[in-house]
Image (spheres, rainbow, N blue to C red):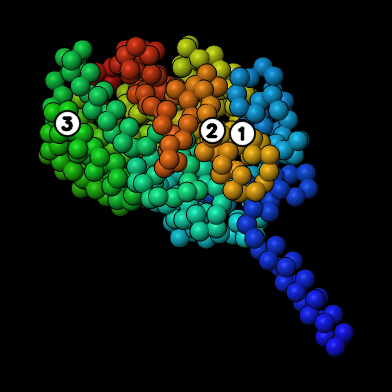
Amino acid sequence: MKKYLLVFILVLAFGFILAACAAPGGGGGGDVVKVGAVYPLSGATASTGEDLKQGVELALEIVNNKHDDLNLPMAKEEGVLKGKKLEVVFADHEGKPDKGKAEAERLITQEKVVALFGSYHSSVTKTASQAAEQAGIPFVNAESTNAKLSDRGFKWFFRTTPHDGTFAENAFQFMKDLNDEKGAGLKTVALVYENTDFGKGFANLAKGFAAQYGFDVVEEITYPAKTQSVSAEVQKLKAANPDAVIFVSYVSDAILYMNTMKDMGVAPKLVWANDAGFIASGFLENLGKDGEFITSREVWAADLAQARPLVAQVNKLYHDKYGEDMNGNSARAFTGMLVLADAIHRAGSTDPAKIQAALKATDIPGDQLIVPWKGIKFGDNGQNTLGSGIVVQVLDGKYTTVWPFDLKAADIVFPFPAWDAR
C-alpha cells in the first residue's frame, strides 16, 4: 500500500510540474522577463517588419539601460522588476492571420512569455490577440488601426495607436481645411484599398465621413493585397478622374500604384494615403523622386522636434543605431513597447493579471512621448483615448508635417504635380 501511495504522490507531483510548465505567464524566471512580438519579418511587408523590430529594439535599449537625460517612461530605470532585463522573443507571421495565431500560441506555451506585442497587419492582430485572450495574456498593439479591434469586448487587448475612426475623419478634416483656407476646390474622392480587414475597415469609415464633410465618393476600387499588377485599377481611377484619391495599401502595393500611375499619367489634385506602405522605409527607397508630393496621415515626423525636443533626442539614438531616421511605424512600435515595459514594472510581477491591471491604470502624459498625442490612457475597451494624427507630405525626400496648419513645418505643395511637369 505504501508503495502505491508513493507512486501516486510522485505521479501527482509530476502532473503539477507539467501543468506549471504549460501555464502561460512563466517568462519571468531568472534574470530576464520575456515578452513575445509577432511581426511580418518575411514576405511582402518584411521591410516594414524590420522598421517595427528596430523600434522595439531601441525601446529595449532604453528600458534595460539608464538614460537620465531622456524624459521617457522607464528611461531612468535599469531593467524591470528590480533590475531584470526585458527580453523580446520575435516571431514571424509572414502577413498570414493563421500563422500569426499559431506563433502567438507558440510564444505563450513554449516560450512562456508574460505578454504579447504586435502585429501590424490588422488581420493578423485580430487572430494573434484572440490567442492571447483565450490564454489570459496581455496583448499590446501599437500599429494596427482597424477600428473594430477594440470593439470585441476583449479584456486583455490594449491599443496605443489611434484607430482608423480618427484617421478617416482626419482625411476629410484636412481636405475641408484645404478648401476653406487654400481654395483647393476638392469635391470628389476615389477610395483605393486592399481587401483585408485593414483596407475594408478604413473604407467603410471613410464613406461615412465623406458624406458628413460634404464630399462625393465617385469610385471605390478594391484589390487583393500583394497583387502583381494594378493596371486595370489605375485605368478605372483615370476614368473616374476624382479630385482626390485615398489609398489604403501596404508597401509593395503602394510602390506598384505609384509606378503605374506615372506610366498612365494619372495625377489627381491630391494623393492621400492611410499611412502603412506609403511611409514604410522601402517606399522612398524604391521610388526616389517619384514618391514626392504624396500626403499621408501620420503619428510621427522628425520635424515635430521643433515643438518637442524629445523627438530629436530619440531619433538621434535611432539614427546612430540603424543609420536612418525613424518613421511612423518604428516610432509607434517604440512607444508601445515602452508602455508595456512600464506596465510590467509597475505591476511588480510577471503575473499576467497584475500586468493587465497595470495596463488599465496607465496614464502617461504627452510630454513623455515622441508621438504628438496628449498622452496614453486606456478606455474600458483597451483603446488609447488620447491619440491623434497629423498629415505629412514628402518634400525633398522627407516626410514633412503640413497639417494641422498650426503644426506645419512647411506649406503643402498643391495640387499634386503632373508627372511630366516635375
In the image, 288 versus 190, the foreground residue is: 190
Residue 35, given in percent of the width and then of the height, sits at: 62, 46
Q: Mark 2 belongs to which amino acid?
A: Thr
Q: Is residue 422 above or below residue 358?
A: above
Q: Is residue 384 left or right of residue 135?
A: left
Residue at (67, 46) in percent of width and height: 350
* Lower position in the chain sequence, tag 2 or tag 1: 1
Between circles 2 and 3, the one closer to the viewer is 2
Q: Mark 3 belongs to which amino acid?
A: Gln
Residues under labels 2 and 3: Cα distance? 34 Å
Residue 312 visible at all: no
Q: Is residue 77 above or below residue 125?
A: above
Residue at (36, 46) in percent of width and height: 151
Q: Which residue is mark 3?
A: 212
In the rendered image, the residue lying farthest to the front is 1
Residue 45, disc: none
Q: Which residue is mark 1?
A: 342
Q: Which residue is mark 2?
A: 362
Asked if disc 2 and disc 1 are in contact, CB closer than 8 Å, the reply is: yes
The secondary structure type at the circle numbered 3 is helix
Residue 57, given in percent of the width and then of the height, sits at: 62, 36
Residue at (17, 28) in percent of width and height: 213
In the rendered image, the residue lying farthest to the right is 2
* Lower position in the chain sequence, tag 2 or tag 3: 3
Residue 197, given in percent of the width and then of the height, sits at: 34, 49
Q: Mark 1 belongs to which amino acid?
A: Asp
Residue at (18, 18) in percent of width and height: 179
Q: Is residue 36 above or below residue 55?
A: below
Between circles 3 and 1, the one closer to the viewer is 1
In the image, 260 versus 394, the foreground residue is: 394
The secondary structure type at the circle numbered 2 is loop
